[in-house]
Image (spheres, grey):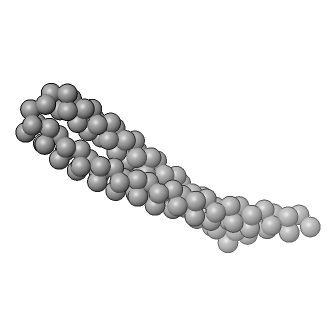
């Protein structure tokens, strides 16, 4: 009886590991989409700043620089999120492999 309970717990752990991996992959895809969008916004912000500098309007230049700083900050945050999600994915894979090794060892 105890052997069956241990086996079921191992299967549950493996199932949870697989769900965690699936969730991590979804989060990485979402982060990647956000990074792509941030980079597009940065290109537009740089263009806006160039046009503002050409026009010589100090207020417009200031706004363009502020927008550029904000979008750079968002990009850094999204890159950090993706890096953290990648770390989580690697950890979940290690846990899955450990659980599979334990299950085979029985």
Q: Position of residue 60 (x, y in %)?
A: 20, 32
Q: Position of residue 21 (x, y in %)?
A: 57, 62
Q: Residue at x 20, y 27 (%)?
A: 59
The outermost residue toward the right is 1
Task: Please indicate, yes or no, whether residue 76 appears anywhere in the rendered image.
Answer: no
Q: Nearer the viewer, residue 103 or 25?
A: 25
Is 74 placed above or below 24 here?
above
The image quadrant of residue 74 is: top left
Q: Position of residue 94 (x, y in %)?
A: 55, 59
Q: Nearer the viewer, residue 86 or 67?
A: 67
Relative to 1, is 105 on the left or the right? left
Relative to 72, is 58 on the left or the right? left
Q: Residue at x 48, y 52 (%)?
A: 85
Is 57 placed above or below 40 here?
above
Q: Residue at x 92, y 67 (%)?
A: 1
Relative to 99, is 47 on the left or the right? left
Is 67 placed above or below 86 here?
above
- The C terminus, quarter of image: bottom right
Relative to 106, is 42 on the left or the right? left
Is 5 placed above or below 46 here?
below
Q: Residue at x 40, y 57 (%)?
A: 32
Q: Position of residue 72 (x, y in %)?
A: 30, 40
| Numbered circles on residues, count | 0
Q: Nearer the viewer, residue 25 or 10?
A: 25
Task: Please indicate, yes or no, whether residue 103 appears anywhere in the rendered image.
Answer: yes
């Amino acid at each position: 009886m105890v052997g069956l309970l241990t086996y079921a717990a191992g299967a549950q752990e493996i199932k949870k590991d697989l769900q965690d991996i699936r969730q991590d992959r979804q989060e990485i895809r979402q982060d990647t989409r956000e990074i792509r969008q941030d980079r597009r916004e940065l290109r537009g912000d740089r263009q806006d700043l160039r046009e503002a500098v050409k026009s010589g309007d100090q207020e417009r230049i200031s706004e363009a620089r502020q927008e550029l700083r904000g979008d750079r900050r968002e990009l850094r945050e999204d890159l950090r999120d993706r890096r953290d999600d990648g770390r989580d994915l690697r950890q979940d894979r290690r846990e899955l492999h450990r659980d599979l090794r334990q299950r085979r060892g029985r």
